[in-house]
């Protein structure tokens, strides 16, 4: 499955006040200091995807995570002929944390359900944040562990 993760380079968000305010209020980043938020604003890229577009593909190499600004994405796993729907994620949710934290390939395919705007943060941009703010890493790990459990459960009973 081809993805648009790398082809869609995105626009810098540092001048977009609405998007910067969204990041500042997000559950993941709300306790960051101003200078660290500024670094995220400078590193973040706003990316747009149309309904049906594959954002990331299961098994692909990944070096970024995404925060959903608008729209809904479907997270699926398994063979193309019999995919298992794991979750639908909406505004404020993030994905891509597994590859970012572990360096492993993408564990699921993420498809835009409708038109979606995301903020992409590279591993290079996130590493200093994760070192400085253990709470951010811990929150991402807790979400990742919950998603692993959900994937196992849904894989056993995909209904």
Image: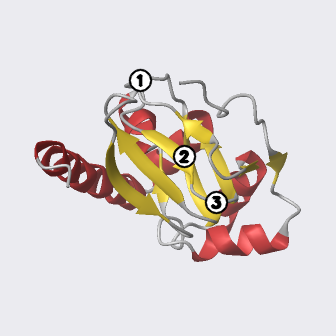
Q: Quadrant of residue 32?
A: bottom right
Residue assigned mark 3: 114
Asked if marks 1 and 3 touch (Cβ < 8 Å), the reply is no
Q: Nearer the viewer, residue 96 or 4?
A: 4
Q: Nearer the viewer, residue 15 or 99?
A: 99
Q: Secondary structure at mark 1?
A: loop
Percent from the top left, x then y, of residue 68? 59, 61
Q: Nearer the viewer, mark 2 or mark 1?
A: 2
Percent from the top left, x then y, of residue 147? 27, 52
Q: Is residue 90 left or right of residue 114?
A: left
Q: Which mark is residue 111?
A: 2
Q: Is residue 135 left or right of residue 74?
A: left
Residue at left offset 48%, top offset 23%: 60
Number of numbered discs present?
3
Residue assigned mark 1: 59
Q: Residues within 10 Å of mark 3 (few under 14, many from 20)?
A: some
- Outermost residue toward the front in this view: 81
Percent from the top left, x then y, of residue 127? 51, 40
Quadrant of the image for the C terminus?
bottom left
Residue at left offset 66%, top offset 62%: 37
**Does the rendering let one see residue 122?**
no
Q: Residues within 10 Å of mark 2 (few under 14, many from 20)?
A: many
Q: Nearer the viewer, mark 1 or mark 3?
A: 3
Q: Is residue 128 above or below residue 22?
A: above
Sequence-wise, the earlier of marks 2 and 1 is 1
């Amino acid at each position: 499955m081809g993805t648009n993760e790398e082809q869609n380079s995105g626009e810098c968000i540092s001048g977009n006040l609405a998007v910067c305010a969204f990041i500042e209020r997000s559950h993941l980043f709300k306790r960051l200091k101003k200078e660290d938020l500024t670094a995220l604003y400078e590193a973040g890229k706003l990316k747009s995807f149309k309904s049906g577009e594959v954002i990331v593909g299961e098994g692909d190499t990944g070096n970024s995570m995404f925060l959903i600004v608008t729209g809904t994405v479907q997270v699926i796993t398994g063979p193309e002929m019999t995919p298992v729907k794991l979750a639908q994620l909406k505004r404020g949710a993030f994905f891509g944390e597994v590859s970012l934290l572990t360096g492993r390939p993408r564990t699921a395919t993420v498809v835009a359900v409708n038109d979606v705007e995301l903020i992409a943060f590279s591993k290079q941009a996130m590493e200093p944040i994760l070192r400085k703010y253990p709470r951010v890493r811990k929150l991402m790990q807790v979400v990742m562990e919950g998603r692993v459990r959900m994937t196992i459960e849904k894989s056993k009973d995909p209904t």
